[in-house]
């Protein structure tokens, strides 16, 4: 396996006491501001979220990777971080939920705190300071003492209402011994708000995070945050970089896998795609929204999640592509689909005709139907491995399936706490679809098995 020495920066985690404090906005502003300073910034996201990494990519000009302590191991997280941050000046990690929130209530498993401890990085705590004054010092003090092993870069106070409010907040922190430094007080601003919908923020593919908004975010951080002090907290540029050996192994492409990529299908773990490439796949992007035919000479298809429910009419109107996909499936083409991709393979989605591989009608509900980590045990051999294979992933959706006929199901599913969930993993010929977004790092042979299935189809064809 080829090895090389590379410079690895010490990571900085942008964390908060809870969701909704402004982590994503601050992260995007930092990425844009540091990039404008001429720094190479490697972005990451803790947890299973797909939307934030897409936004990171636009702000940093570099692919963002998910780091998850429940779906993958400490070794896998460290290896991925080293590979994805190699050569960067700064590694910026956006946390998930609150700093200590993860898969369980009695441990840090799956939390931002777990990840930054594994990577020996520092924490930048973002606090929503609305309706607080001296109490903010007590909040920061509690976070610092909850886990004394954490290293702190500083604190940013967000949504500060006035100069007087800022004065009170700074006085409260300065008068409390042992707190990390307040590196900035960000005023409330309607101009930099990020739009949301039922699965979270709007995705990068929808174009709202343009150059103008990124400039405004960078200006906001430059004006109100001491970026020099923040960089100093990570050490001098050269001193902060550690040289480590990175191993990599990529097979020459032997199969072509079509990847559905557009505004309707945009949820992919980049590490999953990298693993397919390393196993010998050439990934060929296409759009179910606008492409009338599939790319030529494909040996497999991968439909990720996204927002097909917002584009039902356009997907239905692309009749030629739907028919071609159905025909290829009948011919035995390996097809793997997750969440939104599963919906596209059903008979219909909110009344719009889809590809019809699975006899089920999908309907968008007002209330969330599922959210949380999942462990999958394969009950028979599939595209992803033999019976007994265990994989981990995440499920989050607002749709429900109404089965028109019996569908073969090959997943036995459990929550993170071990409670069994309804069976999953729908099979039609050589197609496998599920609501669960799987992390290929949770079972290292998965990418190899999927590529092998595509290679077998190619040879038989």
Image: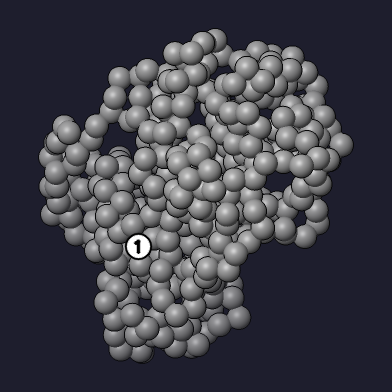
Q: Which residue is found at the position 63% from the left and 37% from the top?
A: 427
Q: Nearer the viewer, residue 160 or 46?
A: 46
Answer whether residue 412 is visible to the viewer in this image.
yes
Label 1 secondary element: helix
Question: As displayed, is residue 331 above or below residue 345?
Answer: above
Q: Position of residue 308 (x, y in %)?
A: 71, 37
Answer whether residue 56 is visible to the viewer in this image.
no
Q: Which residue is found at the position 56% from the left and 61% from the top?
A: 414
Q: Position of residue 326 (x, y in %)?
A: 70, 21
Q: Nearer the viewer, residue 56 or 213?
A: 56
Question: As displayed, is residue 256 above or below residue 69?
Answer: above
Give the number of callouts.
1
Question: As displayed, is residue 302 above or below residue 242?
Answer: above
Q: Which residue is found at the position 43% from the left and 56% from the top?
A: 71
Task: Determine whether, in the image, residue 225 is placed left or right of residue 89.
Answer: right
Residue bearing mark 1: 115
Crowd rating for badge 1 (residues with CA inside 10 Å; few <14, some 14–19, many 20+) = many
Query: How are the colours assigned in the image?
Result: one colour
Q: Position of residue 11 (x, y in %)?
A: 29, 56
């Amino acid at each position: 396996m080829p090895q090389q020495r590379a410079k690895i920066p010490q990571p900085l985690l942008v964390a908060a006491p809870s969701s909704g404090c402004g982590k994503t906005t601050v992260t995007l502003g930092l990425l844009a501001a540091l990039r404008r300073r001429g720094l190479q910034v490697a972005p990451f996201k803790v947890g299973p979220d797909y939307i934030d990494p897409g936004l990171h990519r636009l702000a940093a000009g570099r692919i963002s990777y998910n780091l998850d302590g429940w779906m993958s191991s400490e070794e896998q997280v460290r290896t991925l971080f080293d590979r994805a941050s190699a050569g960067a000046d700064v590694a910026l990690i956006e946390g998930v939920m609150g700093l200590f929130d993860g898969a369980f209530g009695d441990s840090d498993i799956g939390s931002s705190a777990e990840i930054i401890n594994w990577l020996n990085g520092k924490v930048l705590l973002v606090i929503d300071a609305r309706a607080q004054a001296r109490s903010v010092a007590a909040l920061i003090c509690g976070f610092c003492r909850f886990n004394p092993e954490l290293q702190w870069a500083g604190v940013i106070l967000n949504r500060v209402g006035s100069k007087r409010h800022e004065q009170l907040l700074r006085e409260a922190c300065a008068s409390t011994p042992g707190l990390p430094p307040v590196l900035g007080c960000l005023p409330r601003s309607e101009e930099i708000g990020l739009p949301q919908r039922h699965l979270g923020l709007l995705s990068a593919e929808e174009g709202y995070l343009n150059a103008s908004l990124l400039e405004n975010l960078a200006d906001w951080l430059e004006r109100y945050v001491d970026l020099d002090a923040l960089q100093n907290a990570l050490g001098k540029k050269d001193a902060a970089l550690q040289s480590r050996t990175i191993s990599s192994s990529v097979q020459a492409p032997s199969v072509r896998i079509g990847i559905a990529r557009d505004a309707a299908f945009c949820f992919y773990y980049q590490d999953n795609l990298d693993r397919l490439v390393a196993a010998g796949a050439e990934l060929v992007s296409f759009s179910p929204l606008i492409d009338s035919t599939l790319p030529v000479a494909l040996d497999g298809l991968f439909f990720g999640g996204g927002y097909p429910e917002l584009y039902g009419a356009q997907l239905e109107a692309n009749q030629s592509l739907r028919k071609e996909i159905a025909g290829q499936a009948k011919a035995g083409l390996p097809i793997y689909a997750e969440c939104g991709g599963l919906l596209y393979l059903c008979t219909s989605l909110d009344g719009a005709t889809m590809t019809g591989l699975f006899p089920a009608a999908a309907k968008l509900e007002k209330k969330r139907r599922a959210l949380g980590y999942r462990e999958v045990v394969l009950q028979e051999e599939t595209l992803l491995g033999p019976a007994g294979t265990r994989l981990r992933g995440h499920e989050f959706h607002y749709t429900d399936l109404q089965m028109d006929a019996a569908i073969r199901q090959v997943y036995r599913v459990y929550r993170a706490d071990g409670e069994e969930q309804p069976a999953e993993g729908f099979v039609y010929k050589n197609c496998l679809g599920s609501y669960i977004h799987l992390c290929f790092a949770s079972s290292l042979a998965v990418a190899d098995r999927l590529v092998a299935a595509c290679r077998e189809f190619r040879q038989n064809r």
